[in-house]
Amino acid sequence: MSRDGTRVAVGARYDDGGATDAGQVKVYQLGLGVTPWWQVLSGIDGLGSNDQSGTSVSMSSDGSRVAIGAPFAVGTAGPYSGVTRVHYLQTACAANERVQSNACVACPAGSTNAAGDDPSGVDTSCECAANERVQSNACVACPAGTTNAAGDDPSGGDTTCDVTTCAVNQYVASNVCTACPGGSTNAAGDAASGADTTCACAVNQYVSSNVCTACPAGKTNGAGGDAVPGPDTPNSCVATLCATNQHVVSNVCTACSGGLQNYAGDDASGGNTLCDGNFCPSNFRVNNGGSCVQCPSGTTNAAGDDPTGSETQCDATICPANQYVVSNACTGCPVGTTNAAGDDASGSNTACDSAAPANPPPSSNPPGGGDESGGGGGGGGGGGGGGMGIILYVVGGLGITIPVVICMILAIWYKPALRRMLLKCGCVWFANCLVPELETRVDDIENYMAKQKLPRLRDFTPEIDPSEVDLDRDDVLGTGGYGTVYLARYAGEKVAVKAMFEGDSNRVPTYAAKLMRNEAMIMCSLNHPNILRVFGVVTKLGYIVMELCPGGALDEYLYDPDNVLDARDKARLATETATGMAYLHMREVDIVHGDMKAGNVLLAADNSVRICDFGMSDAKNRSKTMTSAVAAGGRSVALTVAWSAPELFKGKNKTSSSDMYALGLTIWQIYERAQPFGSMPEAAIVSQVIGGTRPDYSQTPPPVKKIINLCWSKEAKDRPPADKVACAFNQLYESISRSKSYSGRVHPAPNFNEELNAMNERQSEIDSQHERSKAKFMRKVSMAKMTGRGKSKVHAETRSDADSAQAAEGIVAAPGDSAELGAILEAETEDAPPADAVIDMTAFTVHEPASPLFEDEDAEVAPPPPQPPVEPEAPAPPPVEEDAPVPPPPDDDDAPPPPSPGD
């Protein structure tokens, strides 16, 4: 027993603790548990059988040691020599130990506990340290960027750490919240457990050595937000471009003073600039003395001509249809009169035409007859002289009338033959007046061009922020004299971006910005499926954002032998190219392209045409210098030699006629699939063009040759307008598409049966009309026999009635308004197809047989439509031979009438 009597040791010598009769000693504490005496720790067993440990027991005065005697234990002297063992009673656990079942045991891995736990007491626990968590009853470190308070019990379930959120103006660096570098800022909330973050510089700042630095004078960084820490971003600051009527003073855009003006685009980051003199207002031009003078009456001019530059001209006002010129103003025609469009208001007064009578009254006197009341019976001495005068008048009249009548007959029914005859005789002027080449019906052209009049888009160039354009400089689509074209993305779509100045894209010169705006300003306002769409410009970087055309340039497509083109494909390409040019030349648009060629025609994904590259274009109602290419030391007209009209080599300005010359070369490229003039030097090409030599043909069909020859006529006035060429090729394309022999590779062959039936019905209607006309003619012949009138006069009246009726019913074109494209799109008369052909490819109507424009080698001839029986009649006059003289009309009354369009 201890000295204070609170602890006793009790021996039980025969207890079987560790073995039989091994003996056991137990220590009890007074008042430790719910009972008066409570066992301290576990019992102390003997070491072997029959040890009878506990036979004698002794305790120290403080109760911490117990001496136990075992008389029969194996001692040093041998069996049954006995031993005495002293046991120490632990009263407190050591550091990093805890009490478990009244014993001190080591803490779980990673956990700690202070020394001093009383093993005689209740169980205790260890704890995880700060920024540790419990995982599988062990303390493990929290993930980077997370924290946890100390105290998690590893003997319990798993625990988690908390995410660290960075404060304001802190960023994450290696999962640690770090203060932002000087001058940069960042919002609170960055998760330290995530990826590294950055701070941002303010507006008009850039990064230099991980410090936000103010942009240089005259430069701005409107977007701001440059990342820091990060690479240096000196290019983020771009030059400030002054607005219209501003100039640069100490790197600041300042308003012009004293009424002076200035174009937009001065670079505020450069040196000081000056304002220019006053520009000319609207309807004024610059004369050769450098002064603004008012435009002449009947002409107009847009504001903005620079008096310090070269002399400019005003544009003539052209009156529309049914208007005429009165005192240099377009005035509506009086009621009942008409006038064709095209009167020049800057010229002299014009007049409208009165409506002509449908049928002129027949002459009351027979040909060659005299006055019934005079001359014949003599009247004294003057009778003979009067009779001779009448004879001379009659002979002279016949000498003039007969050739005129013959020419009129040939002009109505045999226009191609008449034109060839006049050209062989050297009468070019008469040939062009009577049978002009490439003449189509006015309503055909107006109907076709009406479809092209789409509404103009906005009349300004939208500015695009550089951050909105994602440009891939590794994907170059093409290069040229006006910049490099890259593939890019804008507004979520693939686009093409023309980078006009690659040398220093962060400092676009003033003249360059103006040139870029010229092209984009023109194209942004155009709205036509055959004109390349422009979305806007990035002025700071010299970018023009355009529609992407995956098909590439037309010339590359044509020169690739793997691309197979049939007659319809070529006609479609020519139609769309000419249609795009016709749109540019429309009065509402009035743009001269200035650089037309197959290389400036792109192909969309469906191979449709897009005319592009308006860097040399001239919009007459916007700017007078768009045809000039800015070069060092001044301005000079840029030319593409092989496609340039002869007059351009003589210093003339580019016009719509020079565009038509280039269009003819472009159509030649489509059909010949070659480079004009091959690899001939430019000087030689200039000599050839001025001398009248043009590229040779090898694959172009004869009808198309004639159109091309007209387009590249030496004289500008002899070239046809674009709308007429577009209409002609559109008719050609539709004719080939409708052809029963055509089976397209790209598009399925059309269902021709319904259209052929409709054409046959139309032909039957024409035949019925002819039968009615012939019946009417025969009735008039019968009446003529009774009244003594000549058959020729009867036929003339009947013919006029029939033509008027047919024109009113829309069956055939009335004389004078019929389609005359046959002069261009007609085969030689010697090779004409049989008379049963029903498709008229040359006059665009179905009123008479004609040879097709193009014939495939395997083409099938359409079967002739059923024809009603007709009465036999006198044979038609023989065709006029090219070298044969034209016979005079017969004088007898029984002469057969001229053939009608249906005979």
Image: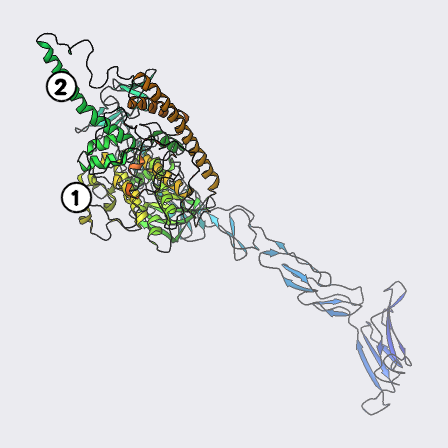
Residue sticking out furthest to the top:
380
Q: Amino acid at mark 1?
A: Gly
- Neighbourhood count class around disc 1 (C-alpha, 10 Å): few under 14, some 14–19, many 20 upward: few
Picture coordinates of residue 326, whole percent (x, y): 26, 17
Q: Is residue 281 above or below residue 188?
A: above
Q: How many marks?
A: 2
* Closer to the camera in the image, 225 or 561: 561
* Residue at which label 1 appears: 691
Q: Nearer the viewer, residue 482 or 14?
A: 482
147 relative to 704 in the view: left or right: right
- Tag 2 secondary structure: helix
The residue singled out by tag 2 in the image is: 392
Circle 2 Cα neighbour tier, 10 Å, few/some/many (<14 / 14–19 / ≥20): few
Instruction: Report whether 79 appears left or right of 755.
Output: right
Q: On the rendered image, what quadrant is the C terminus found in? A: top left
Quick check: 214 above or below 773?
below
Q: Position of residue 800 (x, y in %)?
A: 33, 23
* 675 or 852: nearer the viewer: 852
Question: Residue drawn at (37%, 26%), measured in percent from left and top?
Answer: 774
- On residue 614, the disc is none
Badge 2 amino acid:
Leu
Give residue 872's quadrant in the image: top left
> Which secondary structure, mark 1?
loop
**Residue 783 horizontal/vertical position (percent):** 34, 18
Residue 243 location, quadrant: top left
Indicate the quadrant containing the N terminus: top left, top right, bottom left or bottom right.
bottom right
Pinpoint residue 826: horizontal percent, then vertical percent. Answer: 31, 40
* Foreground label between 2 and 1: 2
- Find the residue positioned furthest to the right: 14
